[in-house]
Structures are given as C-alpha cells and as structure tokens.
C-alpha cells in the first residue's frame, strides 16, 4: 500500500512516503514552510522522489494531536484536501503514539508528553504489546507538569516534545530517552497508519478533527462565563 504521511504538530514538520510499513523517503520541513500553501510543493517533491503520481497514493496518514493549534489545522487541512482530491483513504494518528513508536526495542514502558503551555503537559503512558507495538494504557491527561514529574516512580522512561522544557528539572531517578527520539516523525505516523489500516480502522474524511492540547482561550472564556451564568 502506498502511503503519504504528514506530521506538522511540531515546529519542524516532516513528510514521508511508505510502502506499507517500509519507509521509502522522508523529508523535513523548515519551520517557515509549515503552511497549507507550502505543504503542497513539499508533497509534490516527495512524490517525485519516489516516482508516484498523486492518484497512486492509497492512504494518507496525518498526526492529529495533541499539539499546536496552527500545526494541527495546517496538517489536517492538507491531508483532507489531498485525500479528497485523489480518493485516498484518510487515517489520523495520535501524536503521543507516534512518539512512543520511536522508542528503542528494549523499552517496555514509557510516558510521552507534549507541552500544553501554562506549565502543563498532555501526558500518556504506553506499554509494548506482544507484537512489539507501543499501545496506550489509557487516555492521555492534561496535568500540571511539576506535580506530574514529582509523582512518577523511579526508573520511569520519558519521551516527547515537552522534554525540551522539563529536562533541566528532572529528578535523577527518571530516564529520558535521547533527545533525537522526542519528536514525532512522518515515518512513525505512516507506520502506525499502516498497522491500524491492516487492523481494520478507518476514519471519516468529513468528521476527523484535531485533538488539541487544551481548549482555546476563547473556549475557556466561554466555558467560564457559562459556568458563572448557571450558578
């Protein structure tokens, strides 16, 4: 199966082409290129590199969060537009799971976190299954970063973009992975989509939406006003 994968939840995004779970080509996007307009030329270059026409792509995989508002909207819009134009299937992939998938094989369990601003993170725990995949042990949670770190047991393995902010204050009994493994990649997004497609999962192009790290400021203000009005 020919897969086009997009990862734009981080400041530096990436694109990848895969044949099933096999990565054929991956390219990194410069931070200033992570826009809907500049993604199209990037996708064109990627497809030329592997010798595919757009209509040969069978599955479009995209990271849907948690992550930044702008990056998620840009990536999902580009993925939906491409899938609609070519008739490809669309699958959304959890950003935390895309990071967890990059953990080295000896790692059996780890926590992955992304920065949610205001000294908070979205964190999720993963354990390796019998087939070797990192699977979530439960839903990800929005938590206070300092308290979350304090409550982690000794020898807990950590990864994720939030490590860039948390690493200086980490207790010595915690074990962060190498910094090169903290970010999601388009390759890991594509490999997870290939797995999920083979397991029968399908996403609806029209109803697939981003998973943000937290509600927007406008949403939070509306909820606060709504709670006050109902008291």
Image: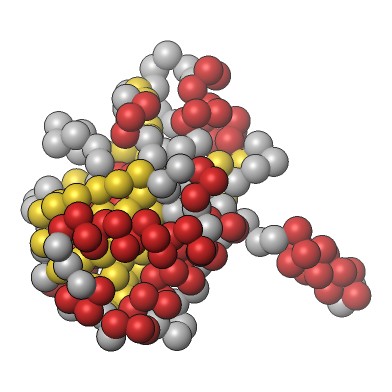
- Residue at 31% x, 38% y is 110
Looking at the image, residue 110 lies above or below residue 124: above
Residue 174: % across, % down: 39, 22
Quadrant containing the C terminus is bottom right
In the foreground, 184 or 66 = 184
Quarter the N terminus occupies: bottom left
Specify whether residue 126 is in view.
Answer: no
The answer to whether 108 is drawn above or below residue 188 in the figure is above
The residue under the point 20% across, 38% down is 108
Vertical placement of residue 165 versus 19, above or below: above
Residue drawn where x is 36% and y is 68% of the image: 92
Q: Is residue 18 left or right of residue 94?
A: left
Identify the coloring.
secondary structure
Q: Is residue 162 visible?
A: yes
Q: Nearer the viewer, residue 91 or 121?
A: 91
State left or right for residue 200 relative to residue 162: left
Residue 145: horizontal and vertical position, in percent?
58, 35
Where residue 163 appears, x then y in whole percent? 47, 31
In the rendered image, residue 187, in percent from the top left (x then y), is placed at 25, 51
Give 52 or 213, whichever is nearer the viewer. Answer: 52
Work out whether residue 83 or residue 153 is closer to the camera in this orientation and state it.
83
Numbered marks: total: 0
| Residue occupying image coordinates x 39% and y 60% | 41
Q: Hey, which residue is sitting farthest top in the picture?
A: 172
């Amino acid at each position: 199966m020919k897969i086009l994968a997009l990862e734009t939840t981080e400041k530096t995004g990436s694109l990848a082409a895969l044949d099933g779970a096999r990565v054929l080509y991956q390219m990194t996007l410069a931070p200033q290129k992570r826009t809907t307009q500049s993604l199209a030329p990037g996708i064109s270059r990627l497809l030329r590199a592997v010798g595919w026409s757009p209509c040969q792509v069978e599955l479009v995989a995209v990271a849907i969060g948690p992550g930044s508002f702008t990056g998620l909207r840009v990536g999902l819009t580009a993925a939906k537009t491409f899938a609609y134009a070519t008739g490809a299937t669309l699958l959304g992939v959890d950003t935390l799971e895309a990071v967890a998938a990059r953990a080295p094989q000896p790692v059996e369990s780890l926590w992955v976190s992304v920065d949610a601003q205001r000294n908070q993170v979205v964190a999720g725990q993963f354990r390796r299954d019998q087939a070797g995949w990192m699977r979530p042990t439960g839903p990800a949670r929005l938590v206070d970063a300092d308290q979350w770190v304090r409550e982690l047991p000794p020898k807990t393995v950590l990864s994720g973009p939030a490590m860039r902010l948390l690493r200086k204050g980490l207790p010595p009994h915690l074990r962060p992975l190498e910094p090169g493994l903290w970010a999601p990649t388009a390759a890991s997004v594509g490999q997870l989509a290939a797995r999920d497609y083979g397991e029968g999962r399908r996403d609806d192009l029209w109803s697939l939406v981003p998973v943000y790290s937290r509600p927007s400021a406008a949403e939070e203000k509306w909820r606060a006003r709504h709670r006050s009005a109902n008291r």
